[in-house]
Image (tube, grey):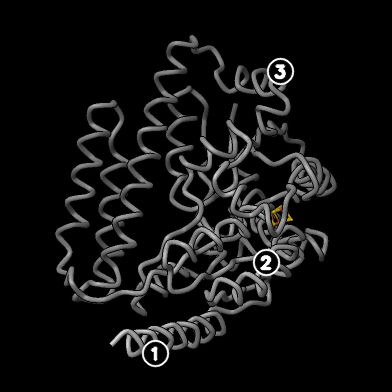
Amino acid sequence: MKVTFGHMGTSAMIFADLLNNLGHEVVKPPKPSKRTLTLGVQHAPEFACIPFKIVLGTYLEVIDQGVDTIISGGGRGPCRAGYYGDLHRRILESLGYEVDFIFFFPPLKTPVDFIRKISRIKGKNSWRAFGHHFRAAWEKLMALDDLERRVHQIRPREVHRGSTSRALERGLAYLREAAALESIREARQAALETVEAVPHVPEREALRVGIIGEIYVQLEPFANFDVEEILGHMGAEVRRSIFLTQYAREDVFADGSKDIKRLARPYLDFKIGGHGQSSVGEVVHMARQGYAGVVQLAPFTCIPEIVAKSIIPRLSRELDIPVLTIFIDEQTGKAGVETRLEAFMDLLWQKKGRRDKKVV
Ligand code: SF4
């Protein structure tokens, strides 16, 4: 198979490696850019959400390189993600491209279908060899998550602006080169040490700011205008509500985090698709953990996040935690996002100043 898939943040390199190791020819999706979005917007229905458009644009950027199979995933339930594969396929067909789609649904809901599709990806490899390659990819994903968590802590305390991001790039390169399990562990260690070596002031005060919302706009920096980096440079120690390995454990191979669902229940006691219920539960969780504020990232027209947004003002009042919602579509510009984040951070610092004064 000559395969490609949608680009979603730093994990893209790991999926490409996994597919390569399984013997497929991989056309690696490029990092999304303005061109990607323009292509997606040109061919997607106007009211499709931004992840749909960026992923479609990505397919169109690489499909002429002989791609015959596209691998993708999506949900089952009230949100539109379940129709993405079909709609992407139909749009590509209408443009004259005949490609096969391997579209994964949550394994708990369609186990037989899931195993059938995994078998296709496994190809001629034995299950043992497949397990080995999968384990290596999982180790890399875990290393990636650890690395990003540490970056979130160091960035607001760095001495030279941008040095943590540069160290992250070097760390990613180590991980990219590692193949065997042992070398992945060594690469993880080397990557963490590289980030640790960034000159920083550990005792510098930073505001803990949570990031919640839909998975694609949380994990793909192009879609969120590098929100983690912007906030880090403004003195925020960010914590995303979604990391891929934790998401796989809690949401793909289980029915969502029980703790977060329990916290959401008094305000929203059923699943509404996407990450709507988790966004509500995460705000409660972050407020209880003493976070200074929360940024909700929501694709424009994303119903689960719109529902969560309608509940958030009440949470914000009752739990005394400011929440900034940023709706994202193709009209959203980086400068506007930066200005809003700057104003939000000013508000959080002021709020903290008032609270500190009260304590004195
Ligand atoms: S969760 Fe929202 S953005 Fe994601 S597919 Fe569903 S509607 Fe679209």
Crowd class of label 1 (few under 14; some 14 to 19; many from 20; radius 10 Å): few
Please indicate whether residue 191 sits to the left or right of residue 217 in the image: left
* Alpha-carbon span between mark 3 and mark 1: 57 Å
Asked if ligand 1 lies within 8 A of label 1, the reply is no
Please indicate whether residue 270 sits to the left or right of residue 176 in the image: right
Residue at 53% from the left image edge and 51% from the top image edge: 8
Asked if ligand 1 lies within 8 A of label 2, the reply is no
Q: Nearer the viewer, residue 324 or 214?
A: 324
Disc number for residue 38: 2
Residue 210 place in picture, x, y as percent? 47, 65
Residue at 75% from the left image edge and 51% from the top image edge: 272
**First-in-chain label (2 vs 1):** 2
Residue 228 place in picture, x, y as percent? 43, 67
Residue type of the residue flagged with mark 1: Arg
Classify 130 as above or below 265.
above
Disc 1 on helix, strand or loop? helix
Crowd class of label 2 (few under 14; some 14 to 19; many from 20; radius 10 Å): some
Disc number for residue 192: none
Residue tagged 1: 354
* Alpha-carbon span between mark 2 and mark 3: 37 Å
Give the quadrant of residue 302. bottom right
Disc number for residue 112: 3
Give the quadrant of residue 256. top right
Q: Quadrant of ligand 1?
A: bottom right
Residue 330 place in picture, x, y as percent? 68, 71
Residue 134 place in picture, x, y as percent? 44, 25
- In this view, the residue farthest toward the front is 359
Please indicate whether residue 105 sits to the left or right of residue 202 in the image: right
